[in-house]
Image (cartoon, rainbow, N blue to C red):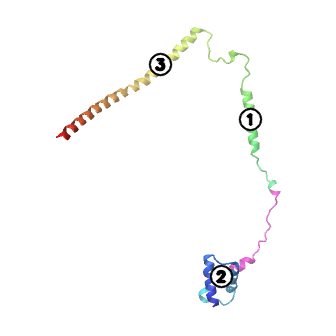
Amino acid sequence: MVLNSIEKLLEKYENGETSLKEEQQLKNYFSQETVAPHLEMYKPMFAYFSVNKQEQFTKALPLNPDGYRDKKVFNYKWIAVAAVAVLTLGYYFKSPVVSSYEEYAYGTYNNPEEALNEVTKQLAMISNHFNKGVSTVNYLEEVNKGTETLGYLNEMQNATNIIFKKQ
């Protein structure tokens, strides 16, 4: 009868359904010297559990709550403050102090003839580049002619379909 109850408890144990009392009964049974021969394989497992329960950790743990302050901790907030300070100073020293309009008038001409010559030269350069671009687009007209030819072929196909369907 005891053997049947131990086998039922082992089955419950393997399914994870035992209570602490039932597990204690199993440990007590397998700690005996005589165990049923077909249950011998469980004896080392329960012996390990009972021995492992008596083990204690004897080493000292360095759990100093102030010990983490001994190491230098890099504070990233100060990087943000320094970055803002550098950007502000860079902006302040980069922006010029302007006293008159002439300091902002970069690339202007005092002589109207020079200005006209420069504008003409720049517009001629733009026109030259624009004409190069337009000349490459002229090939698209040839493509349009080809698609028109295909359109005529479509009309011929429609006509042949009409002829053959009526007969």
Residue 111 magenta-drawn?
no
Placement of 16 over or under 35, stated as above or below: above
Callout count: 3
- Which label was assigned to residue 127? 3
Which secondary structure lies at badge 3?
helix
Give the Cα separation between the discs numbered 3 and 1: 46 Å
Placement of 15 over or under 165, stated as above or below: below
Report crowding for label 1: few under 14, some 14 to 19, many 20 or more residues within 10 A (C-alpha): few
Q: Position of residue 114 (x, y in %)?
A: 57, 10
Q: Residue at x 73, y 31 (%)?
A: 90
Evaluate if marks 3 and 1 touch, with contact meaning CB atoms under 8 Å apart. no
Q: Along the polypeptide, which appears first: circle 2 or circle 3?
A: 2
Evaluate if marks 2 and 3 touch, with contact meaning CB atoms under 8 Å apart. no
Q: Position of residue 121 (x, y in %)?
A: 52, 15
Placement of 113 over or under 153, stated as above or below: above
Which quarter of the picture shows residue 99?
top right
Give the Cα separation between the discs numbered 2 and 3: 95 Å
Q: Along the polypeptide, which appears first: circle 2 or circle 1?
A: 2
Q: Residue at x 72, y 30 (%)?
A: 91
What residue is pinned by disc 2? Answer: 44
Q: Position of residue 18 (x, y in %)?
A: 65, 78
Q: Position of residue 77 (x, y in %)?
A: 75, 44
What residue is pinned by disc 1? Answer: 86
- State the residue in front, 38 or 23: 23
Which secondary structure lies at badge 1?
helix
Q: Amino acid at mark 3?
A: Ser
Q: Amino acid at mark 2?
A: Pro
Give the Cα separation between the discs numbered 2 and 1: 69 Å
- Magenta segment: 44-67
